[in-house]
Image (cartoon, helix red, strand yellow):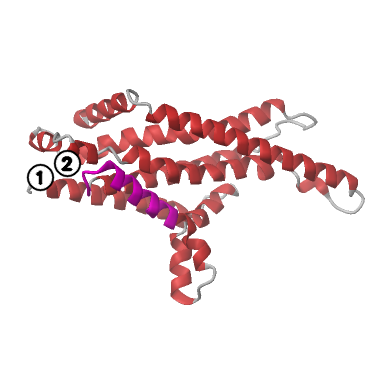
Amino acid sequence: MRNTLSIARKELSVYFTTPLPYALFAVATVFTGFFLVGLIQKFQRLCQLAGQLGQYIDASFLNLTDFVILPCIQQSGLLAAIAAPFLSMRLIAEEKRQRTFELLMTAPVRSVELVIGKYVSGCLILALTVAATFIAPILLDRFSLGVQGSGVDWSTVRVAFAGLLLWTAAAMALGLFISALTDSQAVAAIISLLVFILLWVCGWVGQGSEGIVGTVLGYLSVPEHLEGFMKGIVRLQDVVYFSSLVVLGLFLSHRAVEGQRWV
């Protein structure tokens, strides 16, 4: 445990001495702000339309949580898919490029400690990156007017963020494995980005497929498993999906690092 924490602290200090995390924080905040403004404007137009057609429709379904906050949280899942490759690419690939990986292999540090330490540091940075989205419910709850009590359904928001954090953990585990396969940060980032994009869009491809192919593509789709969380529902199949990606990524990372020890 001591070695794991030491590696995690070392990786965090390296992260914060580079401009990458600060750039990602800034991009995430700006991106979330623009997306939030667009959603609020759309919500206002829907409310105005509902007011004009008040005698014909029931406008009680209009609420900030479903129409503004949850779509904002969901887009952060895509943001995590884009940010994760740039954070994970250096974790092991840079050690190989700088010829310090061999020193780590001869140090009194087990492979599992090395993998977990680097994984924890990457997860913390990625979690901080997507945490910019949490500004949305806080601001809307603070400034929403004309609402009895809270303007935000916090129970649903908490579940949605839990799903988002599960996805960030899975993305970092897979990115770490890919970083362990190469000594090029650029190659690791490109392959990771392609994998995450495929996981994001394979469900759309599966909608046009029938039989086992459509079923498999639908199960592999990240948005399909985030959907339940975005509705405030914790489904066992979704938790198992993201947990399996974390375990698989860490296991493969450990085997890749352990294999290098004997090369």
* CA–CA distance in space, label 2 to label 1: 9 Å
> In the image, 63: left or right of 71?
right
| Residue 60 visible, this orientation | yes
Position in image of residue 168 (x %, y %): 42, 43
Is the stretch drawn in magenta largely helix, strand or loop?
helix
Q: Which of pointers 2 and 1 lies earlier in the amino acid sequence?
A: 2
Q: Amino acid at mark 2?
A: Ser
Position in image of residue 251 (x %, y %): 25, 50
Q: Give the residue pinned by disc 2.
A: 111
Label 2's element?
A: helix
Label 1's element?
A: helix
- Residue 199: numbered disc: none
Q: Is residue 48 magenta?
A: no
Do labels 2 and 1 touch, CB within 8 Å? yes
Considering only vertical position in the picture, is 75 above or below 211? above
Position in image of residue 172 (x %, y %): 35, 43
The magenta stretch spans which residues?
181-198
